[in-house]
Amino acid sequence: MTFFEKLQLPVFWMNTLKIALIFFIVLTILSLLFNSFSDLVSMNLTAVMENNFYDGKWISFFGIKIIFSLVYGMWMTARNMK
């Protein structure tokens, strides 16, 4: 079965979304830990919000992760589907 044939199957998209959601959550947690570890340890959530989410920063923070998660989910699903 080719990749384009797999794209037409509903089960492909369900599996893609399952993988992408888990990968997105893990990627977001790791990214917050790398970007704001000292603020998270000291429970300074205001600084975490300012560094990652205020003034439109949330668009680039989540946008890249959403796209990367969907691509990864599609790749893993296509690779494991027969």
Image (cartoon, rainbow, N blue to C red):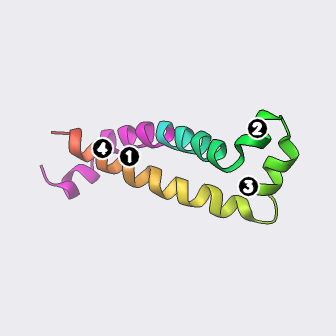
Main SS of residues in magenta = helix
User: For mark 4, does the 10 Å Cα neighbourhood hold few (<14), some (14 to 19), or many (20 or more) residues?
Assistant: some
Q: Secondary structure at mark 2?
A: helix
Structural distance between the alpha carbons of marks 2 and 1: 29 Å
User: For mark 2, does the 10 Å Cα neighbourhood hold few (<14), some (14 to 19), or many (20 or more) residues?
Assistant: some
Q: Which residue in the structure is indicated by mark 1?
A: 73
Q: Which residue in the structure is indicated by mark 3?
A: 52
Q: Single out the mark in the foreground, 2 or 1.
A: 2
Q: Of the residues under marks 4 and 2, which one precedes in the sequence?
A: 2
**Side of 51 where 72 appears, left or right:** left
Under mark 3, the amino acid is Asn
Taking the magenta stretch, the answer to whether it contains residue 48 is: no
Under mark 2, the amino acid is Leu
Q: Secondary structure at mark 1?
A: helix
Q: Which residue in the structure is indicated by mark 4?
A: 76
Under mark 4, the amino acid is Met
Against 18, residue 34 (above or below) is below
Q: Of the residues under marks 4 and 3, which one precedes in the sequence?
A: 3
Under mark 1, the amino acid is Gly
Q: Which residues are magenta?
A: 1-21
